[in-house]
């Protein structure tokens, strides 16, 4: 399910819950991935996301998944364009918005933020509430 959560820095903030629409032009978005736990992880979807070259990929509160992301990025053929990476601490989700920018050579491509939430309804609601407070 996709919804527009609001705007930040005059850029749209999209939220995908449980399924990400890979038809969205990911190479125009800074991407935050929120995975509840390993049962919700899918290495195949990560490869699909990387191939679409988002401006940046931030992982929320999951150091193991972040390590997997770095391994994937280093083992795949070098992407044409730089993909920024970030591990966002559980208590600091606002850092994704406040301290996350695309690389200088990709700044003009930047259209918005995309948050991908993969987890049960309680987990998803908690993430959406945190984002709503930041965008309010």
Image: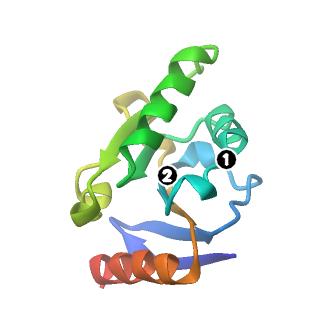
Residue 135 position in % (x across, y down): 33, 78
Pointer 2: residues within 10 angstroms few (<14), some, or many (20+)? many
First in residue order: circle 1 vs circle 2 = 2
Residue for point 48% across, 83% down: 125
Quadrant of the drawing holding the N terminus = bottom right
Circles 1 and 2: CB distance less than 8 Å?
no
Residue for point 49% across, 68% down: 12
**Is residue 9 visible to the viewer in this orientation of the structure?**
yes
**Residue under numbered circle 2:** 31
Q: Is residue 26 above or below residue 69?
A: below
**Is residue 102 visible to the viewer in this orientation of the structure?**
no
Residue for point 51% across, 42% down: 109
Residue 47 position in % (x across, y down): 67, 35
Q: Nearer the viewer, residue 38 or 21?
A: 38
Q: Is residue 41 above or below residue 109?
A: below
State which quadrant residue 76 falls in: top right
Residue 31 position in % (x across, y down): 49, 52
Secondary structure under tag 2 reads: strand
Residue for point 55% across, 70% down: 15
Q: Is residue 105 above or below residue 136?
A: above
Q: Nearer the viewer, residue 22 or 37?
A: 37
Secondary structure under tag 1 reads: loop
Judge left or right: residue 16 versus residue 1.
left
What separation in Å lies between label 1 and label 2 (alpha carbons)?
Answer: 16 Å
State which quadrant residue 6 falls in: bottom left
**Residue under numbered circle 1:** 42
Pointer 1: residues within 10 angstroms few (<14), some, or many (20+)? few
State which quadrant residue 16 falls in: bottom right
Q: Is residue 108 above or below residue 5?
A: above
């Amino acid at each position: 399910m996709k919804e527009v959560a609001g705007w930040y820095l005059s850029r749209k903030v999209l939220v995908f819950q449980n399924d990400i629409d890979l038809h969205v032009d990911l190479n125009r978005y800074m991407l935050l991935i929120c995975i509840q736990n390993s049962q919700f992880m899918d290495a195949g979807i990560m490869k699909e996301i990387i191939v679409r070259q988002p401006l940046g990929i931030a992982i929320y509160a999951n150091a193991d998944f972040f390590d997997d992301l770095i391994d994937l990025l280093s083992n795949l053929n070098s992407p044409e364009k730089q993909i920024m990476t970030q591990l966002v601490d559980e208590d600091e989700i606002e850092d994704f918005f406040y301290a996350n920018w695309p690389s200088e050579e990709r700044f003009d491509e930047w259209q918005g933020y995309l948050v991908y939430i993969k987890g049960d309804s309680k987990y998803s609601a908690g993430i959406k509430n945190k984002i709503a407070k930041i965008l309010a």
